[in-house]
Image (cartoon, rainbow, N blue to C red):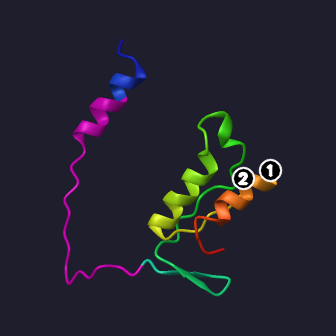
Amino acid sequence: MRDTNQLTRTYMDSLLVELRQLDCTIPDTTFHLFGETFATPIMTAALSHLNSYHDGGMVELDRGAKEANAVLWYGYGEDTELEEILATGQRR
């Protein structure tokens, strides 16, 4: 008897997906929130205490959100951490 991983893999390999596109246009993913416009509706989670995993983790997360022009949600943290995040220039 085969395990479920093998059965699932066999089933997935048996599927055929054929992509057909007619009159395609590049979608507009622009997102508006609180009077601001962002490039994507994908947002960060309201994370906090990332410094225990990586020094300046929240600031790095904010820099990534800024580069992607995405919304950053912020959880709990120290005042100094919030000041560092605000210093990146990300719109709030």
Q: Please, what is the three-letter code of the amino acid marked with disc 1?
A: Glu
Is label 1 in contact with label 2 (beta carbons under 8 Å)?
yes
Magenta segment's dominant SS is: loop
Give the answer, above or below, for where 22 lies relative to 65.
below
Distance between mark 1 and mark 2 Cα atoms: 5 Å
For image coordinates 26% across by 82% down, the residue present is 25
Magenta span of residues: 8-28
Give the answer, above or below, for where 57 lies relative to 11.
below
Mark 1 lies on a secondary structure that is: loop
Q: Is residue 76 left or right of residue 85?
A: right
Query: Closest to the observer: 65 or 44?
Result: 65
Give the answer, above or below, for where 40 lies relative to 78.
below
Q: Is residue 11 left or right of residue 32?
A: left
For image coordinates 36% across by 12% down, the residue present is 1
Query: Closest to the observer: 25 or 31?
Result: 31
Displayed quadrant of residue 50: top right
Q: Is residue 15 magenta?
A: yes
Query: Closest to the observer: 47 or 59?
Result: 59
Query: Closest to the observer: 67 or 12?
Result: 67
For image coordinates 47% across by 80% down, the residue present is 30
Q: Is residue 26 magenta?
A: yes
Mark 2 lies on a secondary structure that is: helix
Q: Which residue is mark 2?
A: 81
For label 1, the crowd category at 10 Å Cα-Cα, with few meaning under 14, some 14 to 19 and many 20 or more, is few
Give the answer, above or below, for where 10 lies relative to 71.
above
Can you give x and y, in whole percent of width and height, for residue 26 in the image? Answer: 29, 79
Displayed quadrant of residue 86: bottom right
Q: Which residue is mark 1?
A: 78
Can you give x and y, in whole percent of width and height, for residue 68 in the image? Answer: 45, 66
**Residue furthest top as drawn:** 1
